[in-house]
Amino acid sequence: MRPPATPCPAPLDGGAAIAYWMPMPFAALVSLSCATLVLNLLAFMTVAAVLPELIAAWSLSSTEAGWLGGSFFAGYVVAVPVVMALTDRIAPKRIFIAGALVGAVASLGFAALADGLWSGIAFRLLTGVGVAGTYMPGLRCLADRLEEPQRSRATSYYTSIFALGTALSIWVGGAAAEWLNWRWAFGLAGAGHLAGLALGWAVLPAGRASTGTGPRHLLDFRPVLRNGAAMRNVLVYFTHTWEVFAYRVWLVTFLVFVEAQQGARFFVSPVAVAMLVALAGVPASMAFGELAARRNRRRATIALMVASVAAGVMLGLASGWPLWMVVALAVLFGMTCYGDTGAVTAGTVALADPQLRGATMAVHAAVGFLGGVAGPLAVGVTLDLAGGIASPQGWGWAFAVMAAGSAAGAVLMAGGRTAR
């Protein structure tokens, strides 16, 4: 049995109220930290869950829908360098609380006020800022509290549980839209931010600002960029998010198309299938993270990426196949494309200079989540060019564009040193 955790050193900014934290065992600390993450992620895939309704209500093209789906990630990318660099100077828990408040305002604002593409994009940009203030700062609280090997294990679990948050986001959003309307989907997402704020204040360690020699200026990331091994891992994360978030944003719309093309229905709703796909990523990523920690991380990740390319291409060709095969391939692709998320992030954490961990995680998240902007948009453009959302050929090309993320990631992993 592991001994109880000891209190985290007080943050250098001296916030006594924010520094409050009850010491707890490793398993409890990680589990409760993951719960705060899940609650703050209820807004993450709300647009994906109701995208067919928004396309119809706002008369969106596939490219415009791609912009709407990717705007969340643009907000995340803009905010996360500042947010994570600040965690080298301010207790991460302070930033977490501020991020949860911003996310709540953004989601509730979408629910009450969004009436078209541009207002929708504005509120989703702000939602991305809010999640940027909760996701990686929450991880920083854990990383500062723990030592290796517990730090890598906690990182793998925390980032893997991300899929549970996105799965619940899809389910809650879809269920609210079905039972009430799409505005309620965003209202419930805002409530999730508020609940996550309350739980995070109670259970997260405060974290601490660096006492070492980090970048002189807040946004001076040159020391991080000179860490070649960590930056290669960051680029791998870009290819990973390209594939994962393009898939998550467009999956419900693809499944609706499959039902319409075949004149038949899945055994559950397309939203429920998408939630199942997202949930399948949780055990896949946790198991692969443990495997990668015990084996050669690079070789294992390359093998998984190759499998993901194959699964993605097959799913793109499967719109006319029996529905059970479509579901099976959708789950398989979800597991393979998401399975390496914990291993890739843990690799960046392991390769970071300890005094620059916050700045390194900022670059990791910002560059990585650019893939979340580019991937959904690239799929939308591809669909418009290849026949639209009602074209089997268009979806075949769309999934090839998604799977290109894993193909590029495998090339990057094969070409240089990464964390073992």
Image (tube, grey):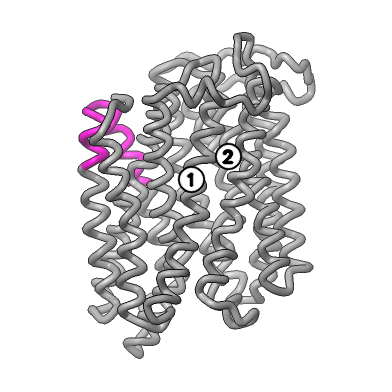
Give the side of residue 387 with respect to residue 85, left or right.
Answer: left
The quarter of the picture where residue 208 lies is top right
Q: Position of residue 319 (x, y in %)?
A: 29, 77
Residue 319 is inside the magenta segment:
no
**The N terminus, quarter of image:** top left
Considering depth in this image, is 343 or 392 the residue closer to the camera? 392
- Report the residue at 52% width, 23% height from top: 143
- Image coords of residue 418 (percent x, y): 31, 27
Are the residues tagged 2 and 1 within 8 Å (C-beta)? yes
The answer to which of marks 2 and 1 sits earlier in the sequence is 2
> In terms of secondary structure, where does tag 1 sit?
helix
Q: Is residue 372 above or below residue 68?
A: above
Predominant secondary structure in magenta?
helix
Give the magenta part as a residue range. Answer: 282-302
- Residue under circle 1? 162
What residue lies at 58% left-to-right and 39% top-to-bottom?
135
Residue type highlighted by circle 1: Phe
Relative height, residue 190 to residue 221 (above, below) = below
Q: Is-magenta flag for residue 286?
A: yes
Cα distance, mark 2 to mark 1?
A: 9 Å
Reading the image, the residue beneath label 2 is: 135
Q: Is residue 172 above or below residue 243?
A: below
Q: Dot 2: what SS?
A: helix
